[in-house]
Image (spheres, rainbow, N blue to C red):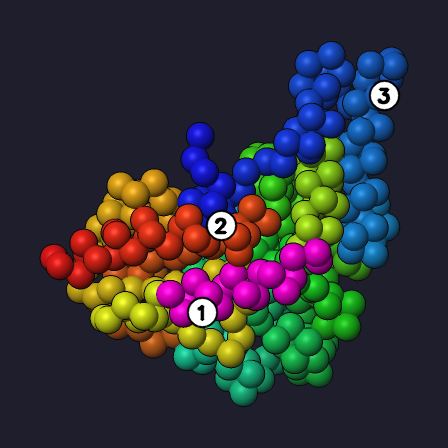
Amino acid sequence: MIDPAYYLDNAATTQILPEVLSEALPYLNEEFGNPSSLYSLGTRAGNAVKRARESLARSFGVPPQGITFTGSGTESDNLALRGVFRSTRLKGERLLISAIEHAAVRETARDLAREGVRVDSIPVTSQGIVDLPALEALLSSQVRMVSCMAVNNELGTAQPLLEIGRLVKRCAPNAIFHVDAVQAFTKIPVPWREAGVGLISISAHKVHGPKGVGALIRCRQVPLEPLITGGGQEQGLRSGTESPFAALAFALAAERCTGLHIQQNREREVYHRRFRDFLEDFPKIRVYRSAAATPFIISFSLPPIPGEVTLHHLEQEGLAVSTGSACHTRAPEPSPALLAVGMSEREALSTVRLSFSVHNRVAGLERVFPPFRAALQRLQRL
């Protein structure tokens, strides 16, 4: 088992918390009932899903029916975008997405464009945030939806959601504002109410919960058409038997992780700063810096060495990192998000991402730096 201090790929996935696994585990064995069944074994399973829904609803300040469990953050993004554009009750034929969206939004938008939706990309600044004047110029009464992620999964930059939301409300008052908060949930506040956000996507395995479960938060009554039909579960928006284990573990992990991030807030900033300073001491290494950075992700490059080569040298020392977005680690093309902030193709292909969780503590840096240094020194001799 990998040393948690050496695991630096938490934007890809996090380790499930032991106490979460322990409390939810009964719903994988003895409490195995179908939550839609009417006898006691089923109703106990249904009550577990209900408790999970109510817990997530409280964390967002929405009614329980505002929580739709899905299979992942990707599915939540798909349901948000496709569900809105399949609805005949909403006006506007245009979709705006930021230039640094996750592939779950970007590829879905591409599919919608093939179906006749006009899709426009909102440029971002070199700081990795939405260019607000450019957004304002794109907004009109024909915009049905604006989708911007809260924290970018490759750069770690936080979007100015309040400013974006105010622009949307003023220039396209009927548009739905969707926020992919997969990398932000439990870590930083998402001011959805003040920003007029209508839909929020989240995922369990980014917050020390299990893989295979996400949620779409409906902050208000947004008309949606389902992607999956059948048994009518999840208020008809996502048919299929729910997993009481996954739903409950998601809610428990979110509660626990929120508390841990609050407790470790100051330490997380120190950890991030010390790791960034450590990297910048090495000649030729370029660390991406932004005033909008959050203390959960660091991207650095050592051009012209490909990021995959850097990854394998670090892996030889027992360290787990990623080359940009984990969803694209096998793609030869440079990351669109990295190119959008002005990186050259060579620099983008050389970029490595470090991402941190509640298990990455300042005290553990003394164990991490020596193997990291050994790998980087080998790379610089290549």
Q: Quadrant of residue 136?
A: bottom right
Q: Which residue is mark 3?
A: 43
Query: In terms of secondary structure, what is the magenta stretch mainly?
Result: helix
Residue at mark 3 to residue at mark 1: CA–CA distance: 45 Å
Residue 51 is left or right of residue 78, and the answer is: right
Query: Tag 2's secondary structure?
Result: helix
Magenta residues? 262-278
Residue at mark 2 to residue at mark 1: CA–CA distance: 35 Å
Quarter of the picture holding the N terminus: top left
Q: Quadrant of residue 196?
A: bottom right
Are the residues at dot 2 and dot 1 in contact (C-beta closer than 8 Å)?
no
Sequence-first disc among 3 and 1: 3
Query: Tag 1's secondary structure?
Result: loop
Quarter of the picture holding the C terminus: bottom left
Q: Give the percent coordinates (x, y) of residue 178.
A: 64, 62
Question: Please, is residue 64 above or below residue 90 in the view?
Answer: above
Q: Which residue is mark 1?
A: 99
Q: Quadrant of residue 181?
A: bottom right
Q: Give the percent coordinates (x, y) of residue 346.
A: 21, 66
- Identity, as a three-letter code, of the amino acid under mark 1: Ala
Which residue is drawn at the image coordinates 53% and 56% (left, top)? 362
- Identity, as a three-letter code, of the amino acid under mark 2: Gly
Q: Nearer the viewer, mark 2 or mark 1?
A: 2
Q: Nearer the viewer, residue 332 or 241?
A: 332
Counting other residues with Cα less than 10 Å from the Cα at mark 1, is it few (<14), some (14-19), or many (20 or more)?
Answer: many
Q: Which residue is mark 2?
A: 364
